[in-house]
Amino acid sequence: MTTDLATVFPDEVVTTSHVRFVELPLGAGKAALITLDNGHDHTKPNTLGPATLLGLEKAIDTAYAEPGVVAVAVTGKPFILAAGADLKGMALVTERSQAVALGQLGHRVFGKLADGPVPTFALINGLALGGGLEIALHCTYRTVSKAAQGIALPEVFLGLVPGWGGAWLLPNLIGADRAVTVIVENALNQNRMLRGPQVAELGIADVTLDGADFLERSLHWAAQVLRGDVEVSRPDVDRSEAAWEAAVARGRAAADGRLHGATPAPYRALELISAARTATREEGFAAEDEALGDLIMGDDLRAGVYAFDLTQRRAKRPAGAPDKALARPVTKVGIVGAGLMASQLALLFVRRLEVPVVLTDLDSERVEKGVGWVHAEIDKLAAKGRLSPDARNRLTALVSGSTDKAVFADADFVIEAVFEEMKVKQQVFAELEAVVSPECVLATNTSSLSVTEMASGLQHPERVVGFHFFNPVAVLPLVEVVRAGATDDATLATALAVGKTLKKSCVLVKDAPAFVVNRVLTRFIGEITRAADEGTPLEVADNALAPLGLPMTPFVLLQLVGPAVALHVAETLHDAYPDRFPVSENLRRLVAAGKPGIWSWNEQGKPYLDDATAALFEQGDVVLTADEVRERALAAVAQEIRLMLDEGVVAEAQDIDLCMLLGAGWPFHLGGITPYLDRSGVAERATGRRFLPPGVASVVRS
């Protein structure tokens, strides 16, 4: 079966296990140092496919066979231990037996680190994800660099479980409660990762060491352990059934709250953690093999791998982007507006670009409030240790404000974040054009208005571009970069370069009403709202999409966005496409009454409809079931996506998925949206064909 696996992963980028023998400090003896390195720089992390695993096994055997070896240590190339399994290859598995064999191979190889004749040390020098961290968990001792980032067991996020020992080893090392946090909760919380000090605090690593000379310090520490100068003590794990099952119940509640049973991976992980209290290592590993067999052969994993590939590759090279050499340098940024969105933008720009950022607004009070907010946020970052005192002082000095747009005379990039009204934005751009240089890019953060119309009265409309962020700016990684009718390549290249420097993922979109995310969401929420307007109970309509495992229900999303903003976008789309985007009169009444949303919230955080809001609602007598609401909403979304692709709003369906993943926080197990529409049959029922070929984000069995 090992040979079969090698044929399944034909394009594996093999990570080589280099073995060298070193004399440990303090006369502690000879150690074998195994370094994982795929031969590429840090932008292409080490991954673990079948050939890599067999190479690691050979290296471990070689290390143990060396006469006089007293320890074996495993580390990685600079900044990276390993990024886990080769996901691209995993998506090519066509038989369950291959999936099980992959789990067994990992257990066999890593198990040699646990069962060897001498102590083993994992030196976690940087990124350690999934199988990378599981290598470390099999070792006798673990050091971690204080500078290390990106340490996690993210499998649940992708539709898998830690399948090379993690689901059994971690709870038995640090206890069920902490293991549930790392394996399930962090994965479901947008794949939250750990830094070096957190890894030690949790008990996953035995010691944190400085990053500058991490390898030398780790070998010195290993020598101290081997000599008996350092005694490694680990806290006792509460192995009581009550504590263990309470942790699992907490994890199940977290999974239910986010996913409502929509995908199996977190529940399988919790089953494995639960069983780890009494199962032997062999039993635990065998259960992991069976879980891998089931999950690798499931569509959710394939959608997760597809989504991961989009966010890691396509997001870094936007489809349709012009030559990046055309981008102009940005040495000063202007922001028109000083409200909350503008202030969030100012904080992001100054932190990432580290250039002067100037905010303007109508009066000094607003300007001072906006600048003050940015300065306060910088102070908070410094207080948390995320900025040095020097960096705090430098960034604070770079942010200023004015009531006079003349301060933008030497700016290279000015973005407006003012009221979402066409005439207001056109006036702002006219005022800017009178003061900025001919090369200055003028960007708009509009969420739905025509960028082409916005620039139509300018002498140089070619330097206007849409640059649409999502709220909260610091959290959501998407920027929709909108090419208007006259936008030239240099402007577009500059905008994309700025987006990359901001550490955002950019998707290039056509100047069409509401672009991508808001257009899809408005059609989606519009169908849910229409069902409620017609007579379906609000609770039924709002929870109809629960089987998808979306991050929040449509009416909760409406509350987050704000009814007034949602109404504005709905009206914009209604003007463009009246047949598909009706405007709810109930939504109009909510906005007129100043309501923050449909639901109120009780002390337990549960939504309910208060009497005042209920009195605003007028409903018909057509009552749909949850299934009927869901089918109708999904069919509408499928139709809208097909129309968007036909109109050329984006290059391909993959860009729609990327936007939904990064701009709306839709889960990886859906693959964005089009893989779900394909595999549920909605795409073909609503549009007559699939969005993606069979085998893309889905299982093709041999």
Image: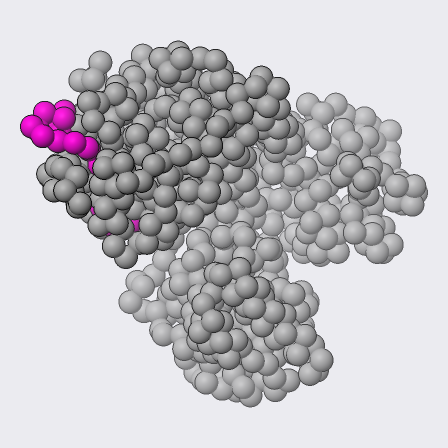
Picture residue at 44% right of the left edge, 62% below the top: 502
Residue 17 among those drawn in magenta: no
Image position of 614 with respect to 252: above or below: below
Q: Is residue 323 left or right of residue 678?
A: left
* Quarter the N terminus occupies: top left
Residue 66 figure quarter: top left
Q: Which residues are magenta?
A: 61-86
Kindly tell me whether residue 460 is visible in this rendering.
no
Q: Say which of 27 and 414 sits in front.
A: 27
Provide residue 251's location: percent of width, then percent of height: 58, 28
Residue 73 among those drawn in magenta: yes
**Coloring basis for residues:** one colour
Q: Say which of 312 and 700 sits in front.
A: 312
Image position of 100 with respect to 431: above or below: above
Residue found at the far left of this picture: 67
Image position of 249 with respect to 638: above or below: above
